[in-house]
Image: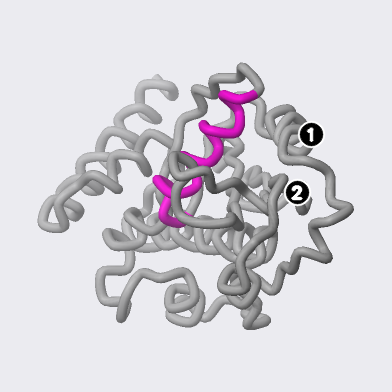
Amino acid sequence: MQEEAVIVFDFETTGSSPKMGDRPIEVGAVRIENRMIVDTFQSLMNPGFTITSFIESITGIGNDMLLNAPPCEEVMEQFAAFIGTTPLVAHNASFDRQFLDSELEQLNLYPENAMACSMLISRRIFPNAPNHKLRTLIEYCGLANNDVFHRALEDAEKTGHLWITMCDTIYETYGLEKIPFPLMQQLEKMKKVKVEAFFERKVVEQKNSMLHLWN
């Protein structure tokens, strides 16, 4: 059941768009190997300007906390080293990816890491969930919940456990032991009606592959 490592990450930010000048104020990430969290990364970062009371109310991160935090450039250089070329996962990945790319481009770094969205994938694995917000899915799956959200490492850890649960659910439901990252990427773009047939085909392919190895 050994699978490639993935890194699940999350940003807290000053707003919704780096194109409008918004920047991260915190990053958190967990590294998953063989369906276990084996390493973490977390840091506040100073965006170079004060944040609004609205962002402070959502995240609990205040300007006083950011005053002595390292600048974005320093933290993002460290984060780039942490992720390397490992495939990445985020909940609502398009949001986090835009900040990752924007910050690393300012360092003349252009990441090419494969990326998957746990929110889109969860719609295919847990179609009966009330909705596919992170908090709802954590409760729906019965995962440990300290009710702390909108802090980067907390959200990354919860998303990491959700990712592991989704992999376990695929195994338990369809008997698919190896779940490569590209398979999860395919799921997020797939129509709901095609999911069952997709997994049935993948199980047959995996069994045929194993028989080929044995013969």
* Main SS, magenta residues: helix
Which residue occupies the foreground of this view, 118 or 93?
Answer: 93
**Residue at mark 2 to residue at mark 1: CA–CA distance:** 8 Å
Residue tagged 1: 74
Q: Is residue 54 visible?
A: yes
Q: Is residue 28 visible?
A: no
Query: In terms of image quadrants, where is residue 151?
Result: bottom right
> Magenta stretch containing residue 92, yes or no?
yes
Q: Is residue 31 left or right of residue 14?
A: right
Residue tagged 2: 45
> Magenta stretch containing residue 24, yes or no?
no
Residue at image coords 29%, 48%: 188
Element type where label 2 sits in the image = loop
Residue 104 rendering spot, x and y as whole percentages: 60, 28
Q: Which residues are magenta?
A: 91-106
- Report the amino acid beneath label 1: Glu
Mark earlier in primary sequence (2, 1): 2
Q: Residues within 10 Å of mark 2 (few under 14, many from 20)?
A: many
Residue 214 rendering spot, x and y as whole percentages: 43, 24
Q: Residue furthest right?
A: 68
Residue 19 rendering spot, x and y as whole percentages: 44, 39
Residue at image coords 20%, 41%: 201
Colour scheme of the rendered structure = one colour
